[in-house]
Amino acid sequence: MSKPNHNRRFISSLAIEALVPLIDEKGQLYVGQGVHPSYRMLVTHGLKLVVAHGVLDHPDAEHLRSSLDIWQLDAGKVLSLRWAPLEIVSFRGGAWTDTLIEISLERGVRPNVGAGPIADLVPRPGPGASC
């Protein structure tokens, strides 16, 4: 069976819109020291979510960026990205994307990133289907 083809830019943008406010609100703060930045971490829905704001990518970088890393607890790291501007460092598709969509819908996030609204991507039960 072949892997589904995920729209990486869409999923990454959705992760930023849906997860970063959640992590900032409910995640535990880990204070940085020396060259290690402060970050917030939250474990929810079988995912470990880590966000850091105001990170200098390397000593010669011209501006600070934010980062988001997602681990699926039973499968390892599935997404690593930086933004402002968006840079997808690593992306591994899988069931975690369905979890991301579920979290975004719970939070009322329905972005439009060059595609239809997220609600249009979620399968809806047809006639006679039970919910």
Image (cartoon, rainbow, N blue to C red):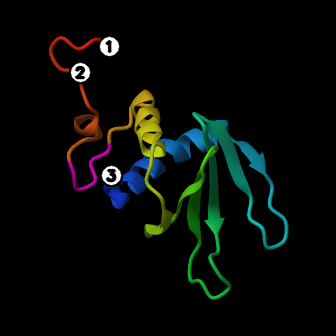
Q: Which residue matches tag 1?
A: 131
Taking 37 as reference, is 48 left or right? left
Q: Which residue matches tag 2?
A: 125
Q: Position of residue 70 (x, y in %)?
A: 58, 52
The alpha-carbon separation of the residues under discs 2 and 3 comes to 21 Å
Circles 2 and 3 in contact, beta carbons < 8 Å? no
The alpha-carbon separation of the residues under discs 3 and 1 comes to 24 Å
Taking 127 as reference, is 60 left or right? right
Circles 2 and 1 in contact, beta carbons < 8 Å? yes
Label 1: element kind: loop
Q: Position of residue 41 (x, y in %)?
A: 69, 47
Above or below — where is 130 with respect to 98?
above
Q: Which residue matches tag 3?
A: 4
Segment tinted magenta in the rendering: 111-115
The amino acid type, in three-letter code, at marker 2 is Pro
Q: Position of residue 119 (x, y in %)?
A: 27, 34
User: Of label 3 and label 1, which has the lower sequence position?
Assistant: 3
Which label number is shown at residue 48? none
